[in-house]
Amino acid sequence: MYYGMGAAVSVRISNYYGQHDVENVRRTATAGFHLILVMIVATSIPIFLLRHQLGGLFTDSQPVSLMVAQLIIPLVIYQFGDGLQINFANSLRGIADVRPMLLYSFIAYFIISLPAGYFFGFVLNGGITGIWMAFPFGLTSAGVMYYLRFKHKTCTKSTVS
């Protein structure tokens, strides 16, 4: 659902960008992120509340079901960062500013998330849950960098003219 909304945001933004309408470019990005937040809340609440039953739908193994319940918590946490990065990555695509995303992704996923996963999973002995706890750091870092780039590119009049 988030990727679908991100694609719609990209299309709307590119339309407004082509018309040199910076105000609606920014409004579309903001509205898209708000809609994604609504989707995150709507999907995360039932998943979190049913976390102890979800594993049982796929296996009779109690240890596997317990692991599923434990991994739902980082899954719910990383939804915010995922929505943020999807929205603003697609916002940048809409204004045809994609080159910096490679660097931002490298920083977020290899410089921040990968070492965090090692630290939480192995140094702090968090196991698989610790490794999964690194995902929110990477996704949110990417989202913040994309947002800041988008804000910078759409706050200057010379970008759209």
Image (tube, helix red, strand yellow):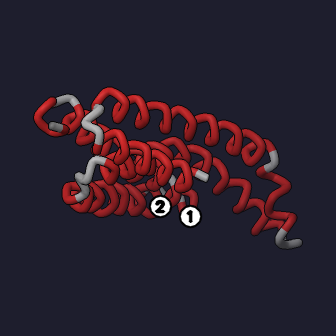
Measured along the vertical axis of the image, is residue 46 above or below residue 96? above
Residue 89 in picture, x, y percent from top left: 36, 51
The residue nearer to you, when weighing 108 against 27, is: 27
45 relative to 101 in the view: left or right: right
Residue at point 76%, 60% (across, down)? 66
Residue 78 in picture, x, y percent from top left: 52, 48
Residue at point 37%, 55% (across, down)? 116
63 relative to 19 in the view: left or right: right
Say the numbered circle drawn on residue 152.
Answer: none
Q: Earlier in the sequence, mark 2 or mark 1?
A: 2
Say the numbered circle drawn on residue 121.
Answer: 2
| Residue type of the residue flagged with mark 1 | Ile
Quarter containing the C terminus: top left
Measured along the vertical axis of the image, is residue 122 above or below residue 2? below
Question: Which element carries disc 2, helix, strand or loop?
Answer: helix
Question: Which element carries disc 1, helix, strand or loop?
Answer: helix
Crowding at mark 1 (Cα within 10 Å: few <14, some 14-19, many 20+):
some
Which of the 4 image quarters holds residue 40? top right
Measured along the vertical axis of the image, is residue 60 above or below residue 4? below
Say the numbered circle drawn on residue 128.
Answer: 1
Q: Can residue 108 be seen in this view?
A: yes
State the CA–CA distance, disc 2 to disc 1: 6 Å
Residue at point 32%, 27% (across, down)? 23
The residue nearer to you, when weighing 55 against 152, is: 152
Residue 126 in picture, x, y percent from top left: 53, 57
Asked whether the residues under the numbered discs 2 and 1 touch, taking CB atoms below 8 Å apart as contact, a structural biologist would say yes
| Residue type of the residue flagged with mark 2 | Gly
Residue at point 81%, 58% (across, down)? 54
Crowding at mark 2 (Cα within 10 Å: few <14, some 14-19, many 20+):
some
